[in-house]
Image (cartoon, rainbow, N blue to C red):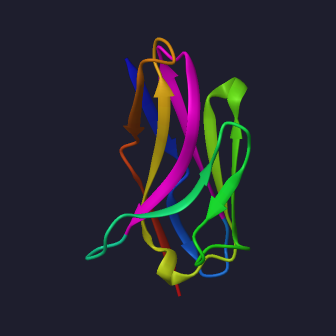
């Protein structure tokens, strides 16, 4: 029905950059908020950044000034540009979106399968 597919994860050196993409596909009426979460071993999943349908953004304090979230509504895609990466950014990153599949009465939260980001020192 609806699926989120992530790409762009990988291994990068500290100080480097990486760009994550998440494309939604399927029977989509509209997309509300979209965001990125991450989870490191032994830690809870945390919100990294989010963006509303109107373009308002929110970032975790740990990534402010380094990460930028954006979206392309025509492509049903959300991006996370990660600059000045640090080893502590190492985690599995998950895409999240609130999607109306049929109408505004049929909203649900969807998750991507996750993409590994590893930052070496």
Q: Name the residue located 47 percent from the left edge and 13 percent from the top edge.
A: 27
Left or right? Give the position of 102 relative to 13: left
Secondary structure mainly formed by the magenta segment: strand
Please say if 121 is above or below 112: below
Total marks placed? 0
Left or right? Give the position of 107 relative to 81: left
- Residue nearest the viewer, comparing 39 with 19: 39
Question: How far across and down, in percent of the image, does residue 3 sit?
Answer: 41, 28
Please say if 85 is above or below 112: below
Q: Residue furthest bottom?
A: 121
Q: Residue furthest front?
A: 105
Please say if 36 is above or below 78: below
Question: How far across and down, in percent of the image, does residue 77 sit?
Answer: 62, 35
Q: Quadrant of residue 86?
A: bottom right
Q: Quadrant of residue 29?
A: top right
Q: Name the residue located 45 percent from the left edge and 34 percent from the top edge.
A: 4
Question: How far across and down, in percent of the image, does residue 71 sit?
Answer: 69, 40
Left or right? Give the position of 103 relative to 18: left
Q: Is residue 25 magenta?
A: yes
Q: Is residue 54 magenta?
A: no
Question: How far across and down, in percent of the image, does residue 20 sit?
Answer: 59, 52
Q: Name the residue located 48 percent from the left edge and 35 percent from the top edge.
A: 98
Specify the segment rendered in magenta.
18-39
Q: Name the residue located 49 percent from the left edge and 28 percent from the top edge.
A: 99
Q: Residue furthest left?
A: 42
């Amino acid at each position: 029905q609806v699926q989120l597919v992530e790409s762009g994860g990988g291994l990068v050196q500290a100080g480097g950059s990486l760009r994550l993409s998440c494309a939604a596909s399927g029977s989509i009426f509209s997309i509300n908020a979209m965001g990125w979460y991450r989870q490191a071993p032994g830690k809870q999943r945390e919100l990294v950044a989010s963006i509303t349908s109107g373009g308002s953004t929110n970032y975790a304090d740990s990534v402010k000034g380094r990460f930028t979230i954006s979206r392309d509504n025509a492509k049903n895609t959300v991006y996370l540009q990660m600059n000045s990466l640090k080893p502590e950014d190492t985690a599995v990153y998950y895409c999240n979106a609130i999607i109306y599949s049929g109408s505004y009465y049929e909203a649900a939260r969807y998750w991507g399968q996750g993409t590994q980001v590893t930052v070496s020192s």
